[in-house]
């Protein structure tokens, strides 16, 4: 079936049409130049033939969702939304010159880049989930690249609110990146199905093909759905992909939703663990959390909260405008100014007299920090949490099976263990037991380290076990 021709670009006041960018089932995307401020923008225009109450509502929902989420550094920015003179709704969005979908099939992407993209896009998905929103169409072609090379997630056109998906109508989906339960209409979308799509997307970027696609084979709809239903994830076929990463992706695409990572955030941590294993720079998590302040002092005079930085790197890229954390800080500043007006703490010229009080506040903080330093918790003030250290690792051998065990040192939600056997890290795990079959060595040594948010703590003392009957 031939592709349709794009629709006529609408006449938009303040914008000049440049060229067609792409066409979809419900909309066309055009490149315009905005006159004030002068910049190139992508304009998504709903097709006249599909404009009805349902599609108009869906389009409006997309505009609202993306506007709410686009302060995130890895979500495409929406500048404005309106209706053209010919009655077609449109969105004005950040222009991105390329998609990841245009690259991964043409050239092999480096593992470091794929892991970084995976962490950033998963951060965007986790942020949407925390706002109660499912994307429901996560795939490589919906990951765009900004002029600065930053990946951003786009197209929330079929997004749904968490908790409402069970009663939602049937929507379009992309089969190669859709979970088995979605393809078989068991659900129209859940957090677990989004984790599946994230795993399938990262897999695709590594392999140059979707997970269940067979090069030169039958990749029609029925054949793909049948293979996805079995959920036997084949290897990526790349020699440079470590077994741990293959295992992370296979877990994300488990047939049983309960066997997958419990959230996009947990998937992020697994990817970060692979980065740590490969000695790659840590890609920061871009997810806002509530427990920003580890140590807080209050200046009773100013009533201004003075807090340390968060323990986990959750900041966004510098290329973006102020995110939610900064917005909260700004809100706090406004509240402080309001309190100052209420208490009359301004000079006759209207300028707030802050210098003496600020100096007093700084003195309080300085004294507190000195006290904390004397108490041995200076690291907390610096915004770092102490990662627990595993102690007293025990090892036993039963024939050629060696088992190492250790006590829980005080894990938090999301923490994982990384067991190194003779210096080689094994896949991350969450149990205090690790067993392996040894056939070629007479002695096996293991150490265990706790990884939190992709950062490894101090390794345990190494425990060695002699193996009888091996060799």
Image (cartoon, rainbow, N blue to C red):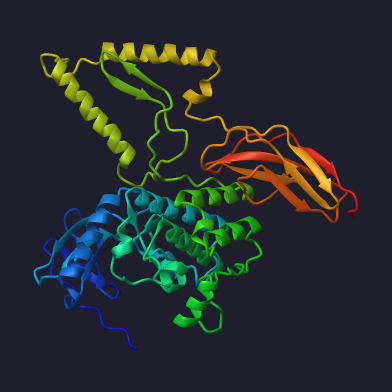
Quadrant of the image for the C terminus?
A: bottom right
Q: Considering only vertical position in the picture, is 386 above or below 177?
A: above
- The residue positioned 24% from the left and 57% from the top of the image is 39
Out of 124 and 352, give the one closest to the viewer: 124
* Residue 323 place in picture, x, y as percent: 32, 42
Q: Nearer the viewer, residue 75 or 388?
A: 388
Q: Quadrant of residue 45?
A: bottom left
Looking at the image, the residue that sits furthest to the bottom is 1
Residue 328 in picture, x, y percent from top left: 29, 35
* Side (left or right) of 20 relative to 462: left
Please tell me which residue lies in front, 469 or 58: 469
Residue 434 or residue 156, whichever sits in front:
434
Q: Is residue 153 visible?
A: yes
Q: For residue 304, which quarter of the picture?
A: top left
Please say if 183 is above or below 128: below
- Asked if residue 70 can be seen in this view, the reply is no
Percent coordinates x, y for residue 110 in the rendering: 56, 60
Q: Is residue 239 above or below residue 442?
A: below
Residue 438, percent from left and from top: 82, 53
**Which residue is at a point 14% across and 14% down the rendered structure image?**
347
The part of the image, by quadrant, that contains residue 82 is bottom left
């Amino acid at each position: 079936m031939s592709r349709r021709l794009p629709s006529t670009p609408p006449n938009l006041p303040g914008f000049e049409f440049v060229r067609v960018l792409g066409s979809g089932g419900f909309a066309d995307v055009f490149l315009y130049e905005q006159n004030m401020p002068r910049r190139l923008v992508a304009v998504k225009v709903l097709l006249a033939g599909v404009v009805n109450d349902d599609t108009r509502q869906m389009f409006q929902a997309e505009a609202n969702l993306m506007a709410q989420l686009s302060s995130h550094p890895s979500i495409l920015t929406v500048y404005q939304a309106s209706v053209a003179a010919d009655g077609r709704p449109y969105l004005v969005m950040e222009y991105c010159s390329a998609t990841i979908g245009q690259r991964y099939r043409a050239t092999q992407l480096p593992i470091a880049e794929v892991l970084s993209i995976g962490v950033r896009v998963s951060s965007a998905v986790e942020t949407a989930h925390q706002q109660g929103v499912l994307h429901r169409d996560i795939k490589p072609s919906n990951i765009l690249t900004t002029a600065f090379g930053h990946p951003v997630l786009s197209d929330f056109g079929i997004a749904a609110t968490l908790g409402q998906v069970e009663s939602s109508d049937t929507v379009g989906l992309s089969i190669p990146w859709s979970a088995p339960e979605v393809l078989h209409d068991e659900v129209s979308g859940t957090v677990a199905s989004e984790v599946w799509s994230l795993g399938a997307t990262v897999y695709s970027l590594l392999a140059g093909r979707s997970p269940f696609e067979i090069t030169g084979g039958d990749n029609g709809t029925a054949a793909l759905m049948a293979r996805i239903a079995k959920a036997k994830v084949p290897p990526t076929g790349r020699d440079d992909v470590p077994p741990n990463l293959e295992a992370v992706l296979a877990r994300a695409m488990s047939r049983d939703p309960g066997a997958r990572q419990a959230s996009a955030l947990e998937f992020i941590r697994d990817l970060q663990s692979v980065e740590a294993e490969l000695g790659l720079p840590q890609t920061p998590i871009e997810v806002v959390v509530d427990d920003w302040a580890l140590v807080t002092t209050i200046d009773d005079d100013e009533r201004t909260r003075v807090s340390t930085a968060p323990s986990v790197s959750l900041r966004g890229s510098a290329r973006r405008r102020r995110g939610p954390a900064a917005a909260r800080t700004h809100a706090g500043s406004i509240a402080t100014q309001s309190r100052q007006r209420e208490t009359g703490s301004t000079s006759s010229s209207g300028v707030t007299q802050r210098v003496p009080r600020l100096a007093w506040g700084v003195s309080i903080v300085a004294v507190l920090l000195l006290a904390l330093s004397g108490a041995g918790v200076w690291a907390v003030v610096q915004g770092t949490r102490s990662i627990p250290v595993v102690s007293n690792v025990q090892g036993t051998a039963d024939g050629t099976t060696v088992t190492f065990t250790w006590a829980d040192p005080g894990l938090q939600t999301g923490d994982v263990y990384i067991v190194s056997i003779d210096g080689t890290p094994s896949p991350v795990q969450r149990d205090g037991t690790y067993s392996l079959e040894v056939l070629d060595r007479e002695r096996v040594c293991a150490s265990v380290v706790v990884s939190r948010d992709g950062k490894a703590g101090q390794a345990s003392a190494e425990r060695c076990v002699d193996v009888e009957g091996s060799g």
